[in-house]
Image (spheres, grey):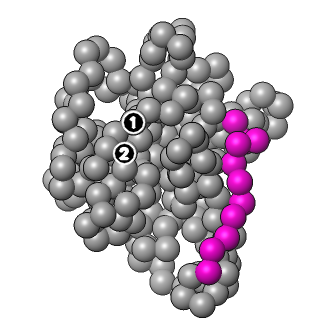
Amino acid sequence: MDKNIPTGLLRRLDPVTGPDNGQMYSDFDLNAEEKTSQTSTNAAAVLVPLIQRPDGWQVLLTLRTNDMPTHAGQISFPGGRHHVEDPGLDRTALREFEEETGVPQSQVQLLGKFDRYRTVTNYQITPFVGVVSGQITLQPDPREVAEAFEVPFSFLGDLANFKRESRIWQGRERFFYSIPWQDRYIWGATAGMLRALALRLAAQKTGINP
């Protein structure tokens, strides 16, 4: 494994395959009164793609098109719903990454996974972290991706950069996490998953279990 992988990351991730060792985060963490009694969820997976650049590690994110059925116009990780033909959720993340970005999944080395995340739209998402190597030629799927861009991993992995915000939604104040970067506004489930990863990294620095 590349020794230049961000410090502490490998030790804080769960194995790609096997049981989930982490906890579950969700859109309801800050809005407990909205949680429903529905127990059935749709399995999904995303990839947190790491790219090494001369100035450090970057995370590749996508901006969803405005006509997507859910989370339209929002910043997200490449990913989507698990298909029955996918051997596992890790393959879901890799398949969706290739479909959305045009980068072959063969260029991705999965490092591990971390805490699952449940959305208000009733998806249970497993996030995987992987290193994208080789010549990277992005060809985003115009049906799903309006734009792909990179954000420094060091910024996204710092808990101090996350904010707790709120908006009025359906007549009620709803709280969420965000992590604005330059002119980008990363919020909702994507920010929630990034915060879960940042919490793991913070635990590694302090020696405290997450």
How many marks on residues?
2
The residue sitting at 83% across, 31% down in the picture is 206
The one of 39 and 118 positioned closer to us in this rendering: 118
Which residues are drawn in magenta?
158-168
Q: Is residue 193 visible?
A: no
Residues packed near mark 2 inside 10 Å, few (<14), some (14 to 19) or many (20 plus):
many
Q: Are marks 1 and 2 in contact (CB under 8 Å)?
A: yes
Q: Could you give the CA–CA distance between mark 1 and mark 2, rounded to whole angstroms?
A: 6 Å
Quadrant the C terminus occupies: top right
Task: Give me the disc on residue 62.
Answer: 2
Q: Earlier in the sequence, mark 1 or mark 2?
A: 2
Q: Amino acid at mark 2?
A: Thr
Looking at the rendered structure, the secondary structure element under dot 2 is strand
Determine the image quadrant of residue 98.
top left
The one of 37 and 144 positioned closer to us in this rendering: 144
- Compared to 100, does 153 lie above or below? above
Q: Where in the figure is residue 112, as x and y percent of width and height? A: 47, 34
Residues packed near mark 1 inside 10 Å, few (<14), some (14 to 19) or many (20 plus):
few
